[in-house]
Image (cartoon, helix red, strand yellow):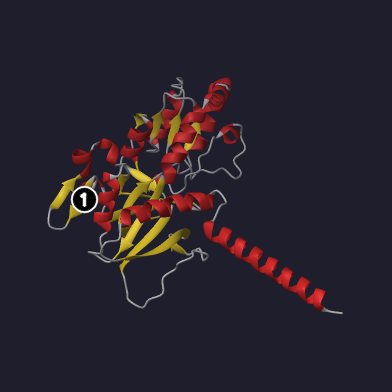
Amino acid sequence: MVDAAMMVKALKLTELVPSETGVLPIETSDINRPGLPFAGYWEHFAHERPQVLGLVETSYLHSLDPETRRMRLKQFVSYDLPCIIICRRLEGMDDMIELAAERRIPVYRSDVDTTKLIVDLIYFLNNHLAPRMTMHGVLVEIYGVGVLLTGESGVGKSEAALELVKRGHRLVADDVVDVRRVSENRLTGEAPEMVRNLMEIRGIGIIDVATMFGIGSVMRSKSIDMIVHLEHWVKGKEYDRVGLDDKTHEILGVQVPWLLLPIRPGRNVAVVLEVASRNLTLKQQGYSAARELEKRMIARMEKTTARAEQVVDAEQP
């Protein structure tokens, strides 16, 4: 379901027949251009999608005689259409508006070209209808990488994010992160409207990061490219020291790179997070320092083995 007022505002539409409930029964980000139905082919008509009319559809309707046009339009609106959007400020759709109003089908007009409207509409619906969940954590952008900090309350997530903001990086959300899956392999996160740009620092209270550090210190939303789980250092616990095993964590069906970062007094967490972000970027570009070390060690062992075999061969009579 889609909020009609939100879609009108986002796409800058003009309401010709407003939605009576304020909610549009749209459950997919796909759209439909009803050229074939207007021509008389109603099989496989995707009536459950938003119906977008451009120059082709309206020109064809105008080419029909009035009786045929009204008959096709009556059949068109006989379906439970979620909404109709007319592009390019095209006129002469009085019959359609009248028939849609009788059936209480919302009709909108857009000033933009059909292709741009379709792109904007799909983008809006993808975000609006995306599966979502709320997580406890802090989301920051570090060198263009969206890093989600997780961990127990009081482990130092907000303090690490504050230090990163001071170093020129950007805060997206503190404490509560609204996560959405906008594609099969991409997640985005943002802060709830109520607490956007705000951060809680124990001992100080709530601070407004945008006001204190400037509007460039925050951003509205960011892709979640990596998860870093912070925990207090546990003596005797084995932590990854090489990085050969690339661990992931699943959120909404998407596997996200995951790191465990132990925290102890005196450790500069902000610097470590900067290094982790740059290291992830290098891995995405095909370079891994851990794999490079592994290759060097294998090459050294092969070279040592070859020398040993040569010595053995030389000692044999």
Is residue 2 visible in the rendered image? The answer is no
Say which residue appears at 33% left-offset and 33% top-offset: 9
* Residue that mark 1 sits on: 199
**Picture quarter with the C terminus:** bottom right
Say which residue appears at 32% left-offset and 53% top-offset: 270
Say which residue appears at 45% left-offset and 41% top-offset: 81
- When the figure is inspected, residue 8 is found, relative to residue 203, above or below; the finding is above
- When the figure is inspected, residue 70 is found, relative to residue 244, above or below; the finding is above
* Front-lying residue, 2 or 47: 2
Determine whether the residue tagged by mark 1 lies in a helix, strand or loop. strand
Say which residue appears at 47% left-offset and 53% top-offset: 280
Based on the displayed image, in which of its 4 quarters is residue 132 positioned?
Answer: bottom left
Left/right placement of residue 265 relative to residue 86 reads: left
* Front-lying residue, 26 or 117: 117
Is residue 11 visible in the rendered image? The answer is yes
Q: How many marks?
A: 1
Horizontal and vertical percent position of residue 140: 33, 49
Horizontal and vertical percent position of residue 41: 62, 38
Horizontal and vertical percent position of residue 67: 54, 25
Left/right placement of residue 277 relative to residue 284 reads: left
* Front-lying residue, 49 or 105: 49
Horizontal and vertical percent position of residue 274: 38, 51
In the image, what residue type sits under mark 1?
Met
Left/right placement of residue 115 relative to residue 11 reads: right
- When the figure is inspected, residue 48 is found, relative to residue 56, above or below; the finding is below
